[in-house]
Amino acid sequence: MPTHGKTTLVGRREEVRAVSMALRQTGENARVLLLRGESGIGKTTVLEAADHLAARSGVLVLRVGLTPHGRTGLDSLAHQIGDLLVKVIEHDALPLVAAVRRAQVEASRDRRHLLPALLETQALVRHAALRQRVAVVLDDAHHVNEGDVGALGALLCGLRTDGVPVVVSGQLLPGGSGALHALAAAADRTVEVPPLTWEQTSTLAGRRLGLLAAPELVSAVRRGLGAWAGNPRAVLSTVGALWESDQLMVVDGHACPADPQLAVHLPIGHAVLDRTWCAAEGSALTNLGFLKEALALLARLTSVAETTVDDFLDLAPELGGSVPHIGRALDALVEHRMVTVTDEQRLACAVPALGTALQTSPARWYEARLHAQVVLNAQRRAGGTHGALDPRLCDHVLAAGAELPDSLSNDILLATVRRDHGGQRRRTAARACLALFHQLPADDADLPAILRGAIALMLDHGDATALLRLGNQLLPEADDFALRHREYLPDLASAWALAALHEQWLGNYVVAYDSPPARTAMRVPPAAALVALALRMRGLPPPPSSAGPLLDLPAQTRPTAVPLAEPPSLQIPAVAEMLLLTGTLGTRAEFNSGLSAVQSLRMDNGLPPLGDTEQLRGAAAFGDWATAFEAVLGDRCARFEDSPLRTYQSLVREYLTGSWDTALALARRVEMYSGGTGRGPLYDHSRSLAAEICRWQGDTARAAAWLAGAAAPHGRGPLASWARTGLQYDSGDAVGAWREGWREYRVLRAGGHLAGLERLLLRLAIYAVREGHDRAAREALGALEELHTCVDSTTTHVATLLARALVWDDVDSALAVHTLPAWQSDQMLSFMTSLWLARSTGEEKWLAEAWEWCERLSARRARQLLVDVAESLGLSLPRRRTSRSVFSAMELKVVQMVAGGRTNRQIAAVLARSEKSVETYLASVFDRTGCRSRLELATAWLDGGLARYVPH
């Protein structure tokens, strides 16, 4: 990995230009320039680069600085200037140097002689400027003693009068204090060194690592650095530490975090604090050691539970100080941007990475006892009433453990689960439910509702790991479970099976039907259907029949002592719905059987019939089970929002719509999850799509690297076989590609893998026709027609029509594809259809249409195919457009929703796209319209100024 080098110059071009220009403007144009910014922002690096440019122009730059240690007065400044000039001036100026030395000695004995020393220094610089262009740079000016600010200002003005430009650099202190604020009055111009932007942070991190920095890495670093997100020194330190601690992985040439929830730490945290305290010397900061300890404690407390200002101040006796003393320390931390306070008076570490670094130091106080004291203090402030306590205290209760009485803990936990658990409270409420479940007696009347609440909240939050843990613990004890609680075992078994299916597809969890929890789940029909689908998704045989139904459950009213969320059963697919989902992988008969059962179920419940079922089958062909479940369950679907499943859902949509750069970024994000190094089918599907994109972009080496991580194709389904066949063909092995592809088709067909198999067969037919192997082409077409007869889906229908067009040169079949709605949803399919029609008919309109699709795909190989067809027909391709004159349909929707006041997250949810895709659409719109912000865009739209961009 390369070293820092000049990486900190990222994003500092304008500042370097301004400083170097000021240094070169000697004589009558001399000015005093003030360069200011926070510690670590890159001021010194800017000065070094500007000094170098000025020196190349023949300017003698006298660079002096003040340090927080040793001599920090103006006599030190004069001493440094004398040392620098004595090396370059002529012998006739040595008496001036001697005069400066004498004045310094006198000034060190009596400050009344400081002004003469400065005057002698000014005369020495003026003498040097008679023979050569001279400029003075004063770095770290914030270390100047407050008593010397006036004299220093006089020196700067005097040098400017003598034609010597001066650049003063320093750190701004909070509250308008410090020498730099006072020196600003003497400056002719002030240049602010701003924090790095997101893009500049990405560039800096990439240079530090010698790799492209993935957006997830940049976001994690900036999120961890918080208030210091734009600080180059902090960014370099953090990124270097992540690399050295093996917390980064290289995926597709990008440095990515090995964990999407990466918590970064700042190795230079202690040094940064020391510099900050020294810069603030003379302010209200007194006990610096205690400030560090207080900041470390706050980082520990707030990382576990929400902590307010009152919570922290009331800990004063435990911390060994008074409330005013603790208050002053907190004020200092807030003033120096170490701690933030929200409108609700909640505290947070402003630089989480700094808090993480400080937490590695030994703790001075017993934290569990402090958490307990926070709860007790809150109870005292509430007048001793448990029910009036804020649910946020639940996390303090859990952290306090045995330090609190069980009665108080249980009361607060119960109060938490009785409250509304919307938004961020869901995880806290789920933890409270689990804690109560283990703490309350087995015969407690509230226990069943608490268990139901925990399951519902975990489903609502998509916490598959917690559901698996709970089910693995309780399901094996089903027969011994207290009769009162067994009413909720079906909910638990079904939720466990849904979580197991989710993790099975990722390869993080192996569902073994003979394991104790699975044996219990197999006795609950909805859970058994989920387990069967989980096994089938991995190509495993179906489980044997269950050992018998669960023991008869008591017909009693559910307890209402703890009114919690809706029953978990509402989020679990019914048996009929599972039959439909399983049928998407099988024949038309299986699918129709499941569909009929679902439609009957919906009719019985007064719901409208299920809509577009072909979308469901198309999603299953790509292994997009998030979309499949949503299509069947609708709003009832349990959403594992932060999971690879949802990321892969976005990846499939971006692939189909031709947003391939975004799709590749999503494929890299999938690899960052903990199961990415495993052999889960979802990861193989993701890698296959990424390889296919790289292959079409002409980068077979990248495509091969993606496929190297995929498992044996016939063990995971047709998608990997489809991608491998394409790569092998593009690598020059046409015969081997067809042979291996056909062998894998037979293996997959024999194993019952039907969903998605049409893509492999269509590819085999295309390659056979292209190579002139008529018999092989007819063989692939026959297999495809047989598959369509068996499956009879829209995707097999489209593939069969295209194969007929290719093999029999049947234009009518291709035109039939062109009229199908499914043709528009897959841009690569649309391109291939238009390209074949252009080659077959020789009509220019089809060539133009293929060009339109090719422009959206940005695929090098697709463009080459298009050029070849155009040359064979003697037609000219349209000129490549730098930008479209009108909005695309998706861009138009984005603009309309921005004008309607929706956020990127809301737009992404409505359009079923990732937020990154929405940002890409907006960037294109901004570039075309010239609008610089969402407000300008909304205003222009509402005023009618964007009418010319709307397609007719």
Image: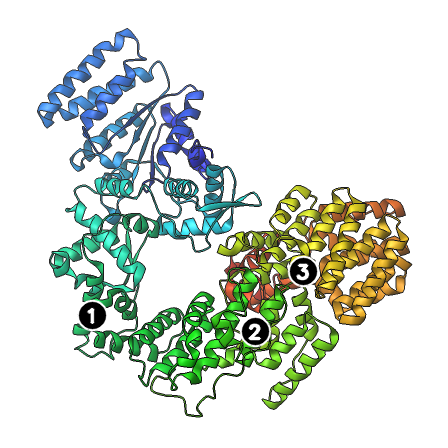
Judging depth in this view, the residue of 654 and 892 nearest the camera is 654
> Would you say residue 923 is visible in this rendering?
no
Q: Residue at x 74, y 63 (%)?
A: 749
Residue 615 lies left or right of residue 362; in this view the side is: right
**Amino acid at the residue labelled 3:** Gly
Please state the horizontal and vertical placement of residue 811, each as a whole percent of the image: 89, 61
Of labels 2 and 1, earlier in sequence is 1
Residue under label 2: 530
Q: Amino acid at mark 2?
A: Leu
Q: Report which residue position mark 1 lands on.
A: 404
Local secondary structure at mark 3: loop
Q: Position of residue 354 (x, y in %)?
A: 31, 48
Look at the numbered disc 2 and give the secondary structure of its residue.
Answer: helix
Residue found at x 17% / y 77%: 384
Tag 3 residue: 717
CA–CA distance in space, label 2 to label 1: 42 Å
- Of residues 339 and 154, the one nearer the viewer is 339
Q: Residue at x 42, y 52 (%)?
A: 262
Q: In terms of secondary structure, where does tag 1 sit?
A: loop
Residue type beneath disc 1: Leu
The residue shown at (67%, 60%) is: 717
In the figure, residue 823 lies in which quadrant? Answer: bottom right
Whether residue 908 sits left or right of residue 51 in the image: it is right
| Vertical side of 510 occupied by 284: above or below | above
